[in-house]
Amino acid sequence: MHSVTPGLARLTEREREVLHRAAHGETNAQIAADLGVTVHAVKFHLSSIFRKLDVHNRTGAAALYLAGGVAG
């Protein structure tokens, strides 16, 4: 079983929601509609996720998530 990496442990609950949805292929617009926020808010959360995980894009973040680095 994988443990939560330090970066993933620092994600807020909302960031974890956004990451979960992004890792499962939802677009920014779909995530925004599902969560009742703007696309801008989703992009903001993704930028914060990338910084905390030290990745450059959603593919890198999704890879960490899908590798089991997020408890959920």
Image (tube, rainbow, N blue to C red):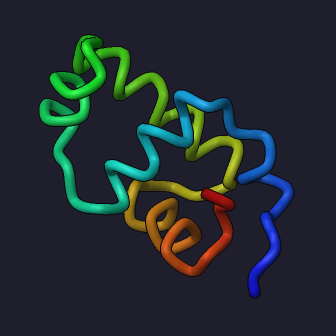
Q: Which of the pair 22/2 is nearer the observer?
A: 2
Indicate the quadrant containing the N terminus: top left, top right, bottom left or bottom right. bottom right
Looking at the image, is 4 positioned above or below residue 67? above
Specify whether 46 is left or right of 33. Answer: right
> How many discs appear?
0
Q: Residue at x 29, y 16 (%)?
A: 40
Residue 15 appears at what percent x and percent y? 54, 34
Quadrant containing the C terminus is bottom right
* Residue 46 found in image quarter: top left
Residue 35 percent location from the top left of the image: 30, 23
In the image, 50 versus 70, the foreground residue is: 70
Q: Position of residue 26 (x, y in %)?
A: 20, 50
Name of the residue lying farthest toward the front: 72
Q: Residue at x 37, y 16 (%)?
A: 41
In the image, is 3 to the left or to the right of 65?
right
Q: Quadrant of residue 70?
A: bottom right
Above or below, comparing residue 21 to residue 66 in the picture:
above
Which residue appears at 49% of the width and 74% of the height?
66
Residue at 17% over, 44% down? 27
| Residue 48 position (above or below residue 4) | above
Residue 28 in the image: state x and y as whole percent.
21, 36
